[in-house]
């Protein structure tokens, strides 16, 4: 069986950047946002969040949904890079 590619595509990179931008604009530290995501039922450490923001870890659909909820934006806003207020 071939190894799975770890390459992050354009949508993943855009989502990663948007997550970081929204987090820094809205003030929560990585540790706080990771705790919010965990409280929503999707366990996440600040290391995992850091790797997502740096596009070094895939952000699966469940991560994306929980991060969007914790940031109070639509998952589509993260995918499209929309910086919703």
Image (tube, rainbow, N blue to C red):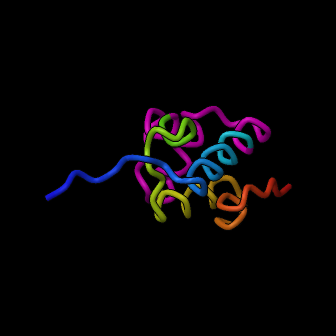
The number of discs equals: 0
Please, what is the dominant secondary structure of the magenta stretch?
A: helix
Q: Nearer the viewer, residue 13 or 19?
A: 13
- The image quadrant that residue 41 belongs to is bottom left
What's the residue at 43%, 43% (across, down)? 57
Which quarter of the rendered picture does the C terminus lie within? Answer: bottom right
Q: Seen in the image, is 2 located left or right of residue 54?
A: left
Which quarter of the rendered picture does the N terminus lie within? Answer: bottom left
What's the residue at 79%, 38% (across, down)? 25
What's the residue at 48%, 36% (across, down)? 51
- x and y, in percent, of residue 44 in the image: 43, 45
- Magenta-colored stretch includes residue 29: yes
Query: Outermost residue, left direction?
Result: 1
- x and y, in percent, of residue 5 in the image: 34, 50
Q: Which residues are magenta?
A: 22-50
Q: Nearer the viewer, residue 1 or 32?
A: 1
- x and y, in percent, of residue 30 in the image: 58, 34
- Magenta-colored stretch includes residue 31: yes
Q: Nearer the viewer, residue 33 or 20?
A: 20
Q: Seen in the image, is 82 located left or right of residue 14?
A: right
- The image quadrant that residue 22 belongs to is top right
What's the residue at 66%, 40% (across, down)? 20
């Amino acid at each position: 069986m071939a190894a799975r590619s770890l390459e992050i595509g354009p949508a993943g990179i855009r989502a990663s950047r948007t997550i970081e931008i929204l987090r820094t604009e809205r003030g929560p530290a990585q540790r706080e946002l990771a705790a919010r995501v965990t409280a929503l039922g999707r366990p996440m450490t600040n290391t995992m969040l850091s790797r997502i923001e740096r596009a070094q870890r895939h952000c699966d659909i469940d991560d994306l949904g929980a991060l969007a909820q914790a940031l109070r934006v639509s998952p589509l806003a993260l995918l499209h890079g929309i910086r919703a207020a």
